[in-house]
Structures are given as structure tokens and as C-alpha cells.
Amino acid sequence: MDQHQNESRKLYERVNFRALFSFAVLIGLWSILTYGGFVDPLFLPSPGGVAEAAIRLFSSGFWGDIGISLYRITIGFLVGAVFAIPLGILIGVSERVRAFFEPVVGFLRYLPASAFIPLAILWLGVGEIQKMFIIFVGTFPYLALLVAGVVIDTDKHLINFARSLGASEGTVVRKVIIPASLPGIWDALRVMAGIGWTYIIVAELVAARSGIGHVIIEAQRYLLTANIITGLIVIGILGILTDFMFQYGRKKLFPYLTQ
């Protein structure tokens, strides 16, 4: 066990070093292009210029915009998960449900979330629910199909063994398929939580007075490129933190998978 933990720690350290090195290379190239005068600051400000813009933004209430975006994404994503997970399980375990719902959900998957903005405004107005609805539309169909795929891929030996012991179909679903699928469902949630962050600009595109997307759109309107980059960096950092939270949750909820 100690040897396995030591190997895991060394691998973790190597991955962290490579990740930091890749960011260092990116910042180095960015510095060369900007401080070297190869790119107009209007199109790409220097790292120092972005840092100054970040200080101005955070000192003028940017924390509130971050909080409201977190709120919108969290609620929109959770509502999507509440509907997508049961539907995905049903699609995975029932061929009849699959035949009925999978084509519809698959169709919705190919519709861009931005195309729903006019309908969302018409149906829900321009308040918070409209913005959460865009997050919901952007994540729900993908998550439902990911969950269905996880359920369908459940080890058939486990299912057949339970049936050979006389377990009913309901018992097989409750006692075998769902427990065996939980790690995969958690991973699907992790993937879609990251994708949910990519919809924040779309969700806050119209009639938003707060939020990271609002700040980015306002910055674009006044050609404040450093503010745009600051907003994008913040979204990236929040996305990485979200991913770390899911990784930590996976270790705590399914420790047997990390042994």
C-alpha cells in the first residue's frame, strides 16, 4: 500500500510540474509577443496590463459578478442534473424508453444553446430564470445521454449473476445497475460541469446587468481587451476549481476506485 501511495504521489507531482510548465511557456510566449511589440495592445494586452485591469475590476465589485455567475451556473446545472440523471438511467435500462426519448434528446443535443435565447426571453422574460434556463438547455441533453451510456455499459456479468439468483428487474436496477453506474455518472457530472462554464457568456448575453459574461460583453463594447482577458482567465480558474472539487468528491465517494 505504501509503495502504491508513493508511486501515486510521484505521478501527481510530475503531472503538476508539467501543468505548471505548460502555463509558464504560455505566459512566456504571451510576454514575448506583447512586451516585444509584435502585437498591438488593443488586440492582446501584456500580462502586466491584464494584471492592472484585474486589480481595477476586483476593486470595483467584480467579486459580486463572479458570485452571481456562480449562482446561475450552479442552479442551472443542478436542475439539469435532476432531470437528466433519472432520464438517462431510464434510457439505459429500458429499450422502450430508449426508443422514445433517445431520438428527442439526441435532437436537442445538436441545437445551440444560443438559439434558445429568443424563446427563453419570450417564455421567461429577462430575469434570472432565463439565464439559468440557457445553462439547463446547454447541459441537460448531453448529460442525459452520457448517463444513459454509462448505464448501458454496466458489466453484464453482474447483471446476469443477479438474475441467476432470482433478482427481479427492479432489484437488478436498484441493487446492481445504479450502484455500478454511480462512478461513471459522477464523471459525467464532472464533464458537464466544466462544459456548463462555457455557456456563461451565452446565458448572460442579453439583458444582463451583472455576471462575468456581462463584464466581458461590456468590455468588448468599449474595447477594453484587458478586461475581456481577465474575465476569461477567471472563468478558466473557476472551471479548474470546479474540476478539482469533482475529483476530490470522487475520491471521497468512491475510495475503492483509488486503491
Image (cartoon, grey):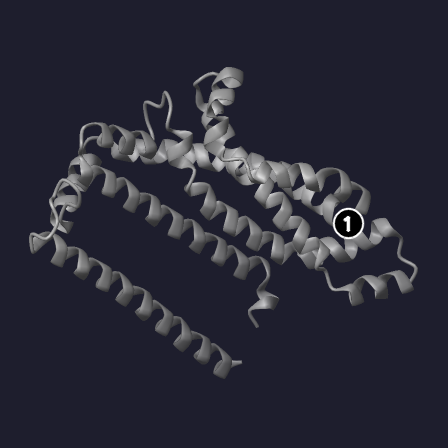
Q: Position of residue 207 (x, y in %)?
A: 36, 20
SS state under label 1: helix
Residue assigned mark 1: 93
Indicate the amino acid at tag 1.
Answer: Val
Which residue of the protein is positioned furthest toward the bottom in this rendering?
3
Q: Is residue 25 found left or right of 48 in the rendered image?
A: right
Q: Residue at x 51, y 21 (%)?
A: 119
Q: Is residue 209 found left or right of 197 in the rendered image?
A: left
Q: Residue at x 37, y 28 (%)?
A: 205
Q: Residue at x 33, y 33 (%)?
A: 213
Compared to 77, does 28 lie above or below? below
Front residue of this view, candidates 174 and 136: 136
Which residue of the protein is positioned furthest toward the right in this rendering?
166
Q: Position of residue 189 (x, y in %)?
A: 55, 48
Specify the quadrant of the image occupied by residue 111: top right
Count the marks: how many? 1
Q: Residue at x 92, y 59 (%)?
A: 166
Q: Position of residue 180 (x, y in %)?
A: 70, 59
Front residue of this view, candidates 36 and 144: 36
Q: Residues within 10 Å of mark 1 (few under 14, many from 20)?
A: some
Compared to 10, does 58 lie above or below? above
Front residue of this view, candidates 23 and 98: 98
Specify the quadrant of the image occupied by residue 126: top left
Q: Position of residue 120 (x, y in %)?
A: 50, 22
**In which quadrant will I find the C terminus?**
bottom right
